[in-house]
Image (cartoon, coloured by chain):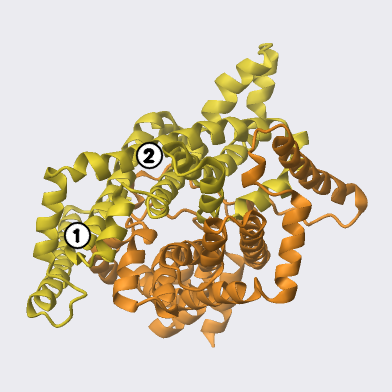
Amino acid sequence: MTSSPLTERSLIRRRSTQHAVATSFSLALLAVWELVGQAGLTPFFPPISSVAVEVSDILTGPQLTRDVLPSLGRALIGFGVASVGGATLGICLGYFRSLEPWTQSPLEFIRSVPPPAVLPLAVMVMGPTYTMRVAVIAFGAFWPVLLNAISGTRHVDPMYFDVARTWKASSWEIIRRLVFPAALPQIMAGMRIALAIALVLTVLSEMIAASSGLGYLVLQSQRLFALDRMYAGVVMLGVVGWLFTVVFAQIERRVLVWYEGQKGLRDG
Amino acid sequence: MPARGSSKLTARFFYREATFEMQDLPPAVTHATAVDPAAEYRRPRGRNLRERLPPAVGFMACALLWELARILGVLPGSATASVPEILRVLFSGLMNGELVDPLLASIQATAGGFLWAVVIGLPLGLLIGVSRWVDAVTRQVVEFLRPIPSVSLIPVGIVVFGLGMGMQYFLVTFACVWPVVINARYGARNVDPLLLDAARSMGCSRRELLQRVVLPSSLPAVVTGLRLSAIIAVIVAVATQMVSGSPGLGRYIVRAQNDGAVPETYAGVLLISLFGWLISVVGIRLERRFVTARTNTVGEMS
């Protein structure tokens, strides 16, 4: 549908008004927070400005290499392990469909294990090590990737398989050149969720039997009643979560350029 | 009354896919939507032996693998318990009440936080979905709050609410309000414009439009959101109890682990997993009721 320039302009104007209102709403909330903090009505909410100062202290101080970066590393490694493992196993389970009746119920049950509850078990079995934390993160992030890989593999257009067989493609070739790319959009959709889970589990794994990391920083600050620092940690984790989402969306868009085009073709 | 006819229409016109994702508030770069097993496993459970056997064998195989790993020393015997031992401890714990109180506390935290999330999230999500102005104004705040990993707020919850149930409710609510909000928003936003026009041309008032068109149309998406958030509620409740030491299965598990009570730790994890599993199964059942109404019309519309 083509719209006349007039309505387009008014649309743009409405957008920018909305944007202005939204920004002032956010700023107003921050201002209320700051005022409540400054007034000292409650010790629980230090002014947002001192939280900001604390954030910059953390980012320029030794905590950057001791807490922040290791946290990010753990989250990303766990996420990577989960993605590779989940995609591989998921494609296998989706491709060899005769396995489904045997594996489906056990998988559904293991998936219901709340990932945080695995943490104490992992501490028991592996000790409070780096590997243990990564393993727990990978466990939690594994499931969305796995389920999406299974589903993506199953929903490959059967006609493609016929074509591949006509060309006498081997099983391995079919999986590598047909199933994997066809399931990739779905797998990446699963990875998007897995990334958020990985971050949550990173924080949690640093709150139990840990001595470093952003989760440890936040919890320790609370115990010492250093509330500026505690909120600073929370804010930074929010920013990290947001960054993860944004960067991953970019990567997804790059990797799946072809899919976007195809989707348009199919819908239109 | 003309509106009555339109409400019947709505039931037949669910054809849009409800979103299962929790990540994309801005619709800009959505490629594939993440699936959830509920949408996949629509097949009714088998009643006869032929269909029941494979899952049972699957579970047995898992148990055997576990025992084998212990015997071969892949898993240290001192830090793992055998399956019969875990089941025995679980059973006796439920009988003598040692596991009952933590379980009840976990259920209370889960249910309370979930209810709060519904009470807050559902109207908010629908409002955001219906009004573009509310959407535009709240979007920045939502986009800032949502990526905060919920568990990082546990210390904040402890500071502000203390160690009681209130803190658990706060954390569970914060974590599981987002799927409710986002799915309600999606459901209300993606009502078929044809239906809206039809209802308007039949003279529906704004309120009638909401009641008879928007609400019923958004129901499947809302139910999906509720199911997702119920699962998140269990997870966050456990995490909260683990870190804060406020009552529940999470605390039970961590204490058992600290005391070196190996079978008890596993029994606690098994129990909370059973609870989580129960919730997801019930959720899938409930959702299926609403999803079938939607899928039946897929063919007609597209």
- Chain for numbered disc 2: A
| Residue plotted at (40% across, 49% down) | A196
In the image, which disc is placed on residue B112?
Answer: none
Q: Reading the chain from its start, which is encountered first: label 2 or label 1?
A: 2
Cα separation between marks 2 and 1: 22 Å
- x then y, percent, for residue B271: 66, 63
Q: Residues within 10 Å of mark 2 (few under 14, many from 20)?
A: many
Circle 1 residue: A229
- The colour chain B appears in is orange
Q: Residue furthest right?
A: B49
Q: Is residue B73 above or below residue B37?
A: above
Identified by mark 1, the residue type is Arg
- x then y, percent, for residue B227: 56, 65
- x then y, percent, for residue A231: 22, 62
Identified by mark 2, the residue type is Arg
Which structural element holds mark 2? Answer: helix
- Chain for numbered disc 1: A
| Residue plotted at (23% across, 53% down) | A236
Q: Is residue B42 above or below residue A187?
A: below
Q: Is residue B210 above or below residue B36?
A: below
Circle 2 residue: A74
Closest to the observer: B99 or B122? B99
Give the chain ID for the yellow colour.
A
The quarter of the displayed image where residue A86 is located: top right
Which structural element holds mark 1? Answer: helix
Residue B283 visible, this orientation? yes
Q: Residues within 10 Å of mark 1 (few under 14, many from 20)?
A: many
Closest to the observer: B52 or B25? B52
- x then y, percent, for residue A222: 27, 65
